[in-house]
Amino acid sequence: MIAAISAAYAAKGKINIIICERMARLGKKILATGNGRCNFTNVNASPQHFFGEDPIFTQPALSEFDIESTLGFFRSLGILPKEEAEGKIYPYSDQASAILDALRLEIERLGIDVRTGFDVKDVFVVKKGFRVVSYKNEAILADRLIVACGGCASPDLGSNGSGFKLLEKLGHRISKLHPALVQIRLKADFLKSLSGIKFKGRVSILVNDKIRHEERGEVLFTDYGISGPPIFQLSAYVPENTAAYISIDFMPGYKKEDIYYLLKQRAKALKHLTMESFFNGLFNKRVGNVIARASGIAKLSLPVADLTDEHINAIAANIKNFKIEISGLNGWNNAQVTAGGALTSQFNNQTMESKKVRGLYCCGEILDIHGECGGYNLQWAWSSGYIAGRSAAQSF
Ligand SMILES: Cc1cc2nc3c(=O)[nH]c(=O)nc-3n(C[C@H](O)[C@H](O)[C@H](O)COP(=O)(O)OP(=O)(O)OC[C@H]3O[C@@H](n4cnc5c(N)ncnc54)[C@H](O)[C@@H]3O)c2cc1C
């Protein structure tokens, strides 16, 4: 959508622009972003927040259509931005539909031809450009082609990986694809009892007992494992064929020794209670029960007065480093983005044009670029889409 708009701005009515969309409506995925609020950019957008074969590939597009240009563009369409924690930006109305409507209305105003239900099956390089054919055998001839098909993540929202096949057929190499920004599945028998509980803490991925990556923020237990923004970020660091663990620090602001003394005092003050009520006011009761069990307390009916020094030490250790084995990641249906994609070395990052096929451009998630959680992925789609559209229009 942004590539089409940018092409229209650059062409000033001199070219016909057509958007082919396989779904019944444009931009279905946008409605699901940011939990329905659309975290549409981040004030910190820069290459270090991106992954892929070569994250520096993003530099020219992110510098040219930077955060200021992005906010200016959306402001011109009526979107008042609102900054939240960690530089995340949302529309003031907190509605993802506002972003989609703004783009849709601009596309309408510019007279861009939108063909919904046009599922591109094949693309042929012909004498004057491209012949784009749908599953219903409709065909379009185009002088230039921008492939903005997204990746494989959340196929119900539109992008189903078909763009990779089109690019491969046109001679491009695609790196290994895997789901990213996705929930982590855990191996533990207590998950059902914790399902639905949220907490703010520090979470790390441990491989061979070494921290591979850590994040802080709000985490959600589910019946299969663990979710939430910090978990989405960590999902990129889960190794494929090596045992790995999630380590949870439930009290990141405290040292283990401080927790030990806090628990000692608590045990003295609450000696008339049983372990079932020991964590009341400190953690969610169900979390407390799981920590108690993991610390060798078999029965929650144990009087607090009977807690040993060994128990208290174990509880403090578990509060700081609660280890749970990772069994895998959720799949494509739950992933927010695709890690991997069309190798960026095959594209010119000043124009987004393919080095293999003249007149063919790519932008967004179909390229081997994905960002951290927090508005970076949409910013990449805006920046690369803007450059692709403008370059295609100016190439005549
Ligand atoms: C649940 C969810 C929440 C997210 N939240 C955020 C967020 O808050 N902030 C953020 O920055 N990022 C978020 N993302 C990621 C972000 O939405 C994507 O990275 C971004 O939309 C990618 O843009 P794109 O244009 O490259 O691809 P897409 O948005 O996937 O668009 C590609 C379009 O091409 C169409 N298409 C695909 N193949 C064909 C074909 N063969 N023929 C015709 N049409 C085709 C698809 O139907 C789709 O409409 C989220 C993703 C998901 C799934």
Image (cartoon, grey):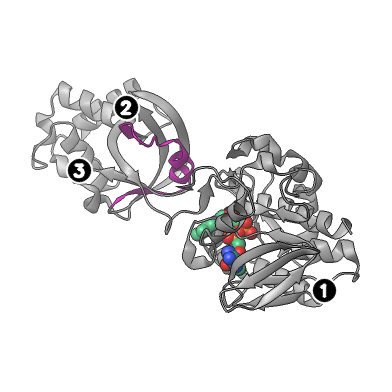
For the question of whether residue 35 can be seen, the reply is yes
Residue highlighted by disc 1: 110
The secondary element bearing badge 3 is classed as helix
Residue shown at the point (76%, 45%) measured from the top left: 61
Front: mark 1 or 2: 1
Label 3 sits on what residue type? Answer: Asn
Q: Which amino acid does label 2 sit on?
A: Ile
Highlighted magenta segment, given as a residue range: 224-246
Indicate left or right for 23 with 201 as reference: right
Quadrant for the C terminus, please.
bottom right
Residue toward you, 314 or 345: 345
Is 229 magenta? The answer is yes
Q: Mark 1 or mark 2: which comes first in sequence?
A: 1
Of pointers 1 and 3, the one earlier in the residue sequence: 1
Q: Does residue 95 appear left or right of residue 43 in this picture?
A: left
Which residue lies under the disc numbered 2? Answer: 259
Residue furthest front as drawn: 127
